[in-house]
Structures are given as structure tokens and as C-alpha cells.
Image (cartoon, rainbow, N blue to C red):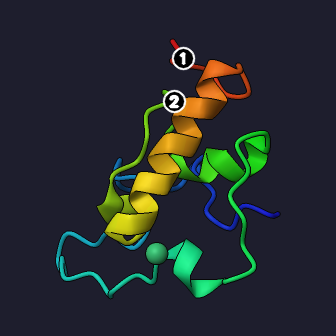
Amino acid sequence: MADKKQHNKKFNRNNNQDEDYNPKFRKMKKKVCPLCADKNFELDYKNAEQIKRFINEKGKILPRRATGACSKHQRVITNVVKRARHIAVIPYSQD
Ligand SMILES: [Zn+2]
């Protein structure tokens, strides 16, 4: 699964993680929950590439405002990330 958001963009003017962020226009368009949007999408705690979408570079779980997930699926994401950390698929922390 290709990661559409490139966090390592060198010419990103702001430090905000969200590339939709615009200081002059802070109202963000409503995001659709990634798990609700694709019903065949199954979150797998063994799939590091998939889970990396929901954690930041320090290994922290992204908040709902960043993932866009609904409250039901954010809880699922949280559990999956914690499970993946436990079996060392993703790190607990970096740096
Ligand atoms: Zn959802």
C-alpha cells in the first residue's frame, strides 16, 4: 500500500503533520474514516506498513484529527498499534 502522504517533504513550509494545514484557512475539509471508507480494509497488527499510517515518526499513535478515523475505529487502531508494539512490529518509541 503506497503511502500517499509524504512526511519527509523537504519543501514543506509548515511543521504541521497535516499537509492540508493552511494557517490562513484553518477550516479543514471533513475527513472520511479510512476504515469506514473501505469495507474490505482489514487492519492487521502484523502489517507494519499499514500501521505506520497511524503513528508519527516518534512512534506515537496519531489523534483522530490526524487519522480522520471515527471513534469506533480509532479505538480499533489504538489496540492494533499497541498489539503491534508488543510483538515488536513497530517500535514503542524512536529517538
Ligand atoms: Zn470508522
Res 46 seen here? yes
Query: Residue 94, percent across and down?
Result: 54, 17
Residue located beneath label 1 in the image: 94
Under circle 2, the secondary element is loop
At x 70%, y 42%, the residue is: 45
Assess disc 1: are there few (<14), some (14-19) or many (≥20) residues with their C-alpha within 10 Å of its C-alpha: few
Closer to us: 33 or 66: 33
Which residue sits at x=35%, y=47%? 15
Task: Determine if residue 67 is in view.
Answer: no
x and y percent of residue 90 in the render? 67, 28
Quarter holding residue 84: top right
Does 34 sit left or right of 50 as displayed? Answer: left
Give the structural element (helix, strand or loop) at label 1. loop
- Using a 10 Å C-alpha cutoff, classify the residue at mark 2 as few (fewer than 14 neighbours), some (14 to 19) or many (20 or more): some
Disc assigned to residue 59? 2
Considering the image in quadrants, where does the N terminus appear?
Answer: bottom right
Quarter residue 71 falls in = bottom left
